[in-house]
Image (cartoon, rainbow, N blue to C red):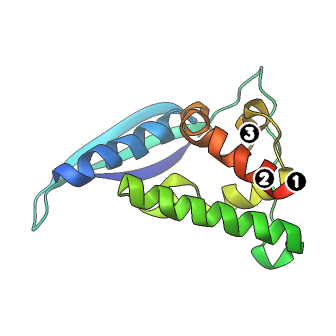
Amino acid sequence: MKVNIFTIRLTSEKFVSDQKFLNDFLETVEFIKSDVHFVEGDVNYWSVLIHFEEKNSQNTTSIKPITIKEEDLEPDQKAIYEELKNWRFQKSLDMNIPSYMVCHNSELLNVVVKQPKTLSDLRRIKGFGELKVENHGEEILKIINAKQN
């Protein structure tokens, strides 16, 4: 069993994005249980501890995540990676959330190396659950396809 801690800030500009981040995560794992505590201080928030297992979907074969570093990318891959990072940064500004909440660097690196052609391919990459693919999949594929042509 694994655990992850989430913070749900109560300010109106942070509440929705924090809640969305938690919901996106929950779609990618097998939920076991949660522990929730209200924390009072200068800024009040809910601290949510999620106990989970990695999802083992019988009908979806995941593409094994790679362990590659940015410096190991080929020049054409670096160009795609930079474009994806720029897209992620702009998306995070638009959504008023940190960049890592849109996509982690490791997810972007996997996309660059695996070069998914369809939304189905993208769903098979670790970190790309149904909601992330629904929200960002078309944009990611458009960036990949634009850089390949």
Quadrant including the N terminus: top right
What number is the disc on residue 149? 1
- Reading the image, the residue beneath label 2 is 146
Give neighbour class at mark 2: few <14, some 14-19, many 20+ (Cα, 10 Å): few
Q: Does the image show residue 101?
A: yes
Mark 1 or mark 3, earlier in chain? 3
Q: Closer to the camera: disc 1 or disc 3?
A: 1
What number is the disc on residue 122? 3
Q: Closer to the camera: disc 2 or disc 3?
A: 2
Question: What amino acid does circle 1 point to?
Answer: Asn
Q: Secondary structure at mark 2?
A: helix
CA distance for labels 1 and 2: 6 Å
Question: What amino acid does circle 2 point to?
Answer: Ala
From the viewer's perspective, is residue 93 above or below residue 145? below
**Residue 14: x %, y % from top left:** 26, 53
Q: Does the image show residue 65?
A: no
Relative to the observer, which residue lies in front, 97 or 127? 97
Left or right? Give the position of 1 relative to 96. Answer: right
From the viewer's perspective, is residue 29 above or below residue 72? above
Question: What amino acid does circle 3 point to?
Answer: Leu
Write the residue at 79% across / 71% down. 78
Left or right? Give the position of 32 relative to 87. Answer: left
Relative to the observer, which residue lies in front, 23 or 88? 88
